[in-house]
Image (cartoon, rainbow, N blue to C red):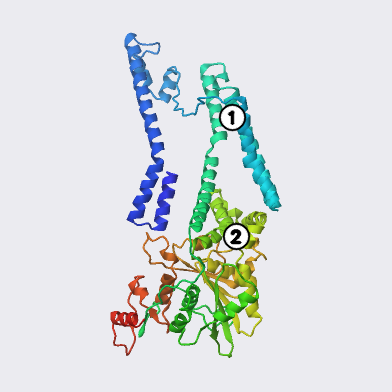
Amino acid sequence: FLILFLFLSVLVYLEAGVAATMFLVAFAIFISLPNFKSTYRLYSVAKDIVFARTQAKNAEASAGNGDESGFETERDAASYTYTERAKLAIPETESEGLYLVDESYRVSRPTRRTAWVLFWCEISLLFLWPTVSLFAVGNWPLAILYGGIIGLTAFRYYFSPAAAMEEIGSMDLVDGKTEREIWQNQSRLNEIVGNISRGKSRGAWVSVISFFAFCFLALFAGAVGDNSTTAEIEDPTYHYMQGYEYLPVENSLRYPTCHMTSDLQESPLTAMADYIFLARVAYRGNVTQSELDNWFGQEVAVNQEELVSVYREENNVDSAVVFKLITYPTETGKDFAYLAIRGTTNQWEALTDAQLWSGAMLMQSLREFLPFGSIWTPVMSLFIDAAVSVESSSIEEISFYKDTVQFTDYLKGHNYAGVAVTGHSLGGGLSMITGAQAHVPSVALSGPNTVLTRKSLDPPISMEELDRYTFNIIPARDVVPMIDDTAQNYQKIRCNADFTDVIGCHDTTRALCEAIYTCGSAGRPVPCECVTQMGFPHPEQMEGTELTFAEACNITTTAN
């Protein structure tokens, strides 16, 4: 019942559609079918045995004329309850046990020489070769850790009580004074050996680890077969409706962070929609400047592409991280710098996500399995730090945040009014790390969080830094920002994607449309895609506009 309740809870939480629900129910029935078959087989066997015993008792009762207790048949006596038997002093009959045994038996026994060959193959391939290889490449911490873990595993495997019982004896060696006592001792020993060799906890952890291993292998296989590069995405630009606007939703407290004015270091941009737009701009290629002109006005916000290129060349920044520098004028005459970090666009970058935040995902899963798992949250960051320190060399290769932090510090040293960081998905996670380490405001969209991962970074991040400099915009049902624990500042927003659309809530366009629809467009143009693709209501027609919504979008589309 608990498993069924958990399964239904997941479906309700995900608000799965009919097709997804039918698929998941069919999958659950498929994996549960062996248990159902085993239960039905046990029921059939039990029913036949009970019927046979009843017939035998009836036959014995019919052959006699009653018993010492004054009952005509044994069946009459058996019909009394336990309390009635005690009052009438009816003697108890011996009960019999029913077992459904499912064990493996050895058909052929290997020779002693074969056993030793298999033993040395296991030791060489699973222990000696990986350990020596790790020492040879200079990864001493991981080699020592692997040797210790595999040593304990080998000890448990080769000195298993179940294996010893299988080799030196059987249940027939268990004795007792009576047949009933022998049966009880055998039952208890069978339960102990079974729990040691194939306990439920062991199976649960094998399933969890196998799931993570399968995910990593799937990402790696997809990355190997992915020929895409880190070039910018050249999808079509938005088609804007001129003369239309979204007004803020009235009589609603959603969302209190439509305009973030608490601490953005006097940033001229405070609207949540503007930061979502900048996070999307990080994915764009040659159309970046035209996108900025359409949204902010002609030559208001400038894409400093040449400055970024010169910086990367002079500082030998050859990592796969892609970022753009957008400058915006302020009243002081100085420009404000916005660093937009691009998110995941191919399988290799997805593998980077998984490697950077794998410790957090594993700890979150562990917390759900453990009783009162939340009490371990304060020390989980220490466990992740210890695990990452073992593979420091491989983590160093994908520490993209070091390049963005270095570039942010470079911008802080120049004559800018201020610096802020934004990004989406992987870019959102990197932007929050960058903001916390460089001590500048960061506004992420759908970014993986950093609370559990913070101590494994170089340098480590404190909770004070995360709470002061980071902000995460989290669409409903978006899986990526569920990774790691959220810091103090975040805003959950709605998602109107179909419940069967797994990645629909991770879309930057959908998040942008939700922001301007709820908070109001506030002078920004409304993309036609908000209505035609994302399913939002038509915007309000502004005074002096004669074109209908359809005409405005068609004319804009034709012009582009």
Mark-to-mark CA distance, 1 and 2: 40 Å
Image quadrant in which the C terminus is located: bottom left
Image height check: is 84 above or below 438?
above
Image height check: is 163 above or below 214?
above
Give me the disc on residue 163: 1
Q: Nearer the viewer, residue 515 or 548?
A: 548
Foreground mark, 1 or 2, reads: 1
**Residue 351 on image: x %, y %:** 53, 59
For the point 45% across and 78% down, the residue is 287
For the point 37% across and 13% down, the residue is 70
**Residue 39 on image: x %, y %:** 39, 33
> What amino acid type should be assigned to the residue bearing mark 1?
Ala
Tell me, yes or no, if residue 439 can be seen here: no
Residue 48: quarter of image: top left
How many numbered badges does the structure rendering display?
2
Tell me: 310 left or right of 529.
Answer: right
Tell me: 46 left or right of 257.
Answer: left
Give me the disc on residue 452: 2
Q: Are marks 1 and 2 in contact (CB under 8 Å)?
A: no
